[in-house]
Amino acid sequence: MTTGTTTSVSLDVRDVHLAFGPNRVLRGVDLTVPRGATACVIGPSGSGKSTLLRTINRLIEPDRGDVLLDGRSVLRDDPDALRQRVGMVFQQFNLFPHMSVLRNVTLALRRLRGLGEDEAEAVARAQLDLVGLAGKADARPAQLSGGQQQRVAIARALALRPEVMLFDEATSALDPELVKGVLGVMADLSAAGMTMVVVTHEMGFARQVADTVAFMDRGVALEAGPPEAIFERAEHPRLRRFLAQVL
Amino acid sequence: MDPLSTLWETFFDWDAMRDALPEMLTVGLPNTLILAVSAALLGSVLGLLLAVAGISRSRWLRWPARVYTDVFRGLPAAATILLIGVGLAPLGMRVWGPDPYPLGILALSLIAAAYMGEIFRSGIQSVEAAQLEGARALGFSWADSMRLVIIPQGIRRVLPAWVNQLIALIKDSSLVYFLGLVASQRELFRIGQDYAATTGNESALLLAGHFYLALTVPLTHAVNWIDRRLRQGRPATAPTDEDEDDTGSALAGTTEGERR
């Protein structure tokens, strides 16, 4: 399975702060992802991982700090235009249940990219083929397994030719035997040179696929580095405790 | 005649029914349908606007929608129809002449919109926030996300309640007789009522009742059918798996897992 060529960009998160009322969810997060690299973000629940992802494509606006794509701040851009450049995959897939798989993928191509019906369909079918679901184009999302749904969601995001991909616990809602197929698609995408930020509890994936692993706890990236450094030579006691529990 | 057959004749005088039937078919039924269908269309459009205004983040949209809904749901339909149909008649006279239909349809629509607005709003608000997030993440604006993703799902969920409102509308269309109808403008109820008044026999009114039932009973069954279909999903083709890493648990509803 290949995932096509990408024109990805570098991503820099700089000192991002965010509070919901008195609850300071992000307290100065930095994350650097070179062009074509994959960063995995690990950490306990409630540490701000998912919120961090949402500040990158501005589903949530950060209170302070900056997010740079190829060195250029995204905070000045139109958020809707930005989100077309940044693909996102969710824990619960967020497919549109009232549309066929094919229309899930063609919707943004037609409405946002202005592609004609035939052209959008060709792009969508090719993308579905890449995630191994060409035969499911006419099915409804509810007729697919969780793993298949998540691969459709990945195809839907990739169809827009994003420059960065964000994965928010993409396999956490899946039955164990369905996880592998989705992780395989993600690994292929990483190998194809997509810039990716992957929030995950799959430590095996982080170890094998990530170029950088960042450990988040209570709204800060406590420690970041190559997977070997994080998993074998963790410095911070909090990270060592976390790894002792999940590995 | 004994009292029992008198009673029978009062309601089931076949000749009286036969006399009224042609006019009911050629005048009453089309007019009832014109009133009900026009008001259903206009009421649905207005209701949808009310629903969207009702969930708007701007209080300048939310408040008027709230007040509108309270007023038009709270007034008796007959009062609203008279207030608008008679109150605005001088204005209507200048625009389209003495025809009471435009104002009658307007009044019926305004009433229906208040109910439909609440129905649509509850449907739209029942769509998971994750759907909006999914659409926004693709780059759709809030308005496009609502139009393409949220509203179509929300409306589907409340179709049974919406059809109930159509039934109410068909019945309420009889109230336009308050506005004074010339012979060709009479709808089912008025024609039945006129025959009943001139003959002193209720059979024509009962016939009108049958027409209403012929319109509303299929709709009530349509509601049940739609409801069942929405609950169980359309007859789905069984999920098939062509890849061995992804088999077995392909079931509807996997998207309904726990959310953090």
Image (cartoon, coloured by chain):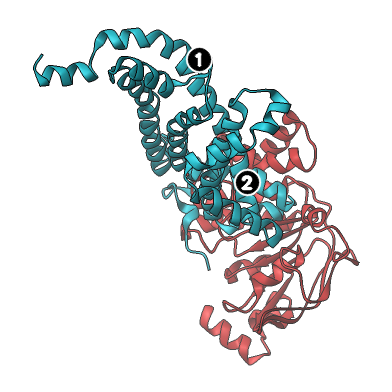
Determine whether the residue tagged by mark 2 lies in a helix, strand or loop.
Answer: helix
Q: Which chain is red?
A: A
Determine whether the residue tagged by mark 1 lies in a helix, strand or loop.
Answer: helix
Residue A238's label in the rendered image is: none
Q: Colour of chain B?
A: cyan
Residue identified by numbered label 1: B183
The percent position of residue A166, horizontal first and vertical second, equals: 70, 61
Residue at (11% x, 21% y) in the render: B3
Q: Nearer the viewer, mark 2 or mark 1?
A: 1
The percent position of residue A215, horizontal first and vertical second, equals: 67, 79
**Residue B233 versus residue B36: which sits nearer the camera?**
B36
Residue at (61% x, 68% y) in the render: A200
Exactly how many numbered labels are in the figure? 2
Residues behind callouts 2 and 1 on a single chain: yes
Type of amino acid under label 1: Ala
Residue identified by numbered label 2: B149
